[in-house]
Image (spheres, rainbow, N blue to C red):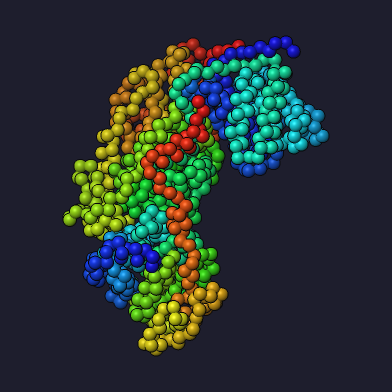
Amino acid sequence: MSSIAELCVIESGAVEAHSLDDYESEKPRWCKGCGDHGVLAALQRMLRTNNLDPEDVVAVSGIGCSSRLPHYLNTYGFHGIHGRALPIATGVRLARPELPVIVIMGDGDCFSIGGNHWLHAIRYNINAVVLVLDNEVYALTKMQASPTTPDGCKTNTTPHGTYLQPMNPLSAVMGMTNVSFVAQTATWLPAHLDETIEKAWEHHGLSFVRILQRCPVFMPKAFGEGGLNFPVVFLEHEDGIPVHPSLLARGAARAHNHRDINEAQRVAVAVDPAPMGLIYQNPDVPAYEEIRWNRKERPDHQTFVQRLDAVMDRYTVS
Amino acid sequence: MNRPRIVRLPEHIVEIVSDAGEGAQKAAVAFARLCAKTGNGLWTVEIIPSEIRPPPHTIGSASGNRIRLAERSQVTNAGNLADVVLAFNEMALLSRLEAGSLADDVLVLIDDQWATHDVEEYRLSYREVLDKFRTRGATIIEMPLQEETLRHVEDAEQGKNMFAVGLLCALYSKDVNLLKNVIRGIFEKKTREVIETAVKLAGAGYEYGLAHLEERFEIQAVPTDVPKVAMNGNTALALGAVSAGFEMCSMYPITPATSASHELSDIFEDFGGFVHQAEDEIAAIGVALGASYAGKTALTITSGPGMALKAEFQGLAVMTETPLVIVDVQRGGPSTGLPTKIEQADLLHALYGAPGDAPKVVMAPSTIEECYYILSVARKIAEEFRMLVIVLSDANLATGQQLFDRPDVCETQERPPLDLSPVSPGALPYDWDPTTGLSQRLIPGQPGGMGVTTSLNHDVNGKACYDSESNQRGHAMRSRKLAALQRSLHRPSVYGEPEGDLLLVGWGSTRGAIEEAVDMAREEGYAVSSLNIQFLSPLPPGLHEIFAGFEKIITVELNYSDDWEDPLITKENRRYGQLAWILRAATLLDVDCYAKVPGRPYMPVEIVDEIQRILGDQPAVESLGETLRALKGVS
Ligand SMILES: Cc1ncc(C[n+]2csc(CCOP(=O)(O)OP(=O)(O)O)c2C)c(N)n1
Ligand code: SF4
Ligand SMILES: [Mg+2]
């Protein structure tokens, strides 16, 4: 959302630098060890790095453990209903394109009940940072299978193991028209998470970020016990998400051109090892709200009345 | 031919029907415009098949319009049985008989090509249907509609309708030059050739009519200085949305609501607004809610099935006290039901469709003119009370056309620029006034107002909380706003005398027919009056007092109720019309109902019949037939 970011900084005079405290609200109520804590912290760091005024930022979420995040962020926030964060965010962007918008959803929230909105949001390509906190389970409702729950995993609704292969959200978004930014990161890789969220912020268009998220309470075994034994490969490119040498202990790095959609689609389809980093970016896809704003005008009162008069003429009979 | 007889009439109802795609609709639009331009009051009703191109020459394929035109400029409903029907084939004609729309002695104008058509089946059914009409007392004029049209164009399908409208112009002694101008206006965007052909055909139809019609009609207009507009209710809603200062309409296509967004899509961007066609109705309301949360004025337009999908978001709007307007253009339900036809069956859904206790405002326009003005009222209430306002229109208003005084376009309500000044220290997002439940809204971008707006139960600080005290309080505050609004409403006025034997209570578009029925019944000596209720939630003040003036109260509405005579139906299990449910609960009076689902507007005579059934027939008139004859009063 770079252009808006610059605007905001300039408008606020860039006089006072914000501190991390400025973005802190009430104390988070997630479980100890929950990956959501890390996402909150990373977001707060991104806001501070870009010195965004808290009153200009709107964080929109659905329902789930992850969707509580706006409560803990000292910006404007809208904690909506399950699966529907994206329509609300689209409304905010259409109404006030000057406000930076961050969307936070869970895997059930986005990929299941909100699936229709998710795919269409990619096509609208509103200018927003869209984070899916994917713990591969419905956590708030106490451990039911989600679309990304691993094959055979036992949950309360699949006590003998799930029946289906998990969905691959990355290949789904890579198949959508107008996809403009796709990245994957994980809560157990804080530096990578920070860099990914920063990159998502800088992108102009819908930045879709899937964050693999630890849920030690309901999915302690997921992601190779929270990342310990989870095969990943870091995607490397000079404009991509930097791969710190410390990350290489977790997995190898591989050159990847995130501007090449075919290459990105191939990478998105592969799940083992899981690709980490910037999978695809196309900064030239127009944002829906800008297309719409470019086509409308806001006439002054006199012109408004004249135009309404002219429309009324069409229906005037005597 | 001898000099034709010209019969002067106070009003008439004419129907034009063809196969879908043959253009009876266009012909009717032209004729209605012509009548409006000459100053006749009118009300039109679209006759729409449910499919785009149903099998031709069948009952299901009939498409067209009913036009009620009158000397007086105020026509408030579609009227009783039609006096004239112009049909392109006998099945279209038959469909109107089956719909119960035609008078026994209707004048039928019909294309005679079927009498000698190559297809034997058509020849037979043509004879059969016409015989049926003759037996009933109809006058039939067979005319070479197809043949005459073919003298001017190669494809009669592309012109019969214009020939037909020329005929009607002659039948009603209208000025053919005026008709030609109307046609030029309607086809404005077409090529010159198309326009001139249409004009030529209309002229030919007119000449044919002058030469062959032995009896013609004249419905003079009462001249008026007040400029008038003619439009349907959906157009009125669309223009009303602009004038009310809405900046976004977020919608998903659904009959019969869609045409409102067609109109808006066409013009809205010139007024600083836009129509967003969302991926479904859920997203449509979500986008509107998001825009409203961000400070803009937004509405969403839909019909019954879409209302169901919006239910959860309605709850969110109520819980977060985000101003929002939903227009529900009602159609026949449940489920896909009768998509193109009228029903008033979403009232209880509008009131109670959202989960939990979700107090909201529900209003219903009763005329097309009110469709224009209602959205500014709805917007004001939504913003001042931070409430969800549902506006219940219906298919009758949506597609009917009415003449009304041209609105003053200077009275627009564009939203002033957003006030993004810093929030004063200590200001709270839900700073409820304990008496009224009202609180001030904070808008993103206001320094110092940061905080989360949540769907969870919350306190004055907007913080989620789970205790019983805050939950009770939040509910009370949201409910209190309805009481506060109710205190500011006017007592509705009774149509007719304030006391009598029977009060008919209606809501929405049935108003015109009800009031006309009241006029007719009073003329016959019945002590009957009526009341139209515009606010269904909160109900307006004074209902108890008004009801006390009458022996019996009955609602007249277009939704389902069990008949007392139906098998198994008792006092304990009878299901009432929807307004009757509400009034019974609100007044503890034994409010009865006349509530049916004919898929068309009520005719005033049907309501008069019901009045007679309830009050007995001690006054003069005895039967529907007699009422009708009395009503027509012409020979
Ligand atoms: C319409 C609706 N259906 C179901 C629920 C119950 N529900 C709440 S959260 C949730 C799933 C949460 O899973 P996810 O989106 O993955 O978020 P997480 O809790 O794992 O962060 C469900 C099914 C609801 N609140 N609303
Ligand atoms: S249940 Fe899981 S996802 Fe929810 S807060 Fe606890 S650890 Fe986090
Ligand atoms: Mg989850």
| Image x and y of residue A3, in percent | 38, 65
Q: Quadrant of the C terminus of chain B?
A: top right
Task: Determine the residue positioned at 71% across, 26% down.
Answer: B204
Please state the total of marks drawn on the protein image.
0
Nearest to the observer: residue B470 or residue B152: B152
Quadrant position of residue B155: top right
| Image x and y of residue B555, in percent | 42, 29
Whether B238 is drawn above or below B35: the answer is: below
Nearest to the observer: residue A104 or residue B260: B260
Task: Determine the residue positioned at 54% across, 25% down.
Answer: B37
Q: Is residue B572 visible?
A: no
Q: Is residue B84 left or right of residue B528?
A: right
Whether A14 is drawn above or below B172: the answer is: below
Task: Determine the residue positioned at 49% across, 70% down.
Answer: A282
Whether B257 is drawn above or below A238: the answer is: above
Q: Is residue B207 left or right of residue A209?
A: right
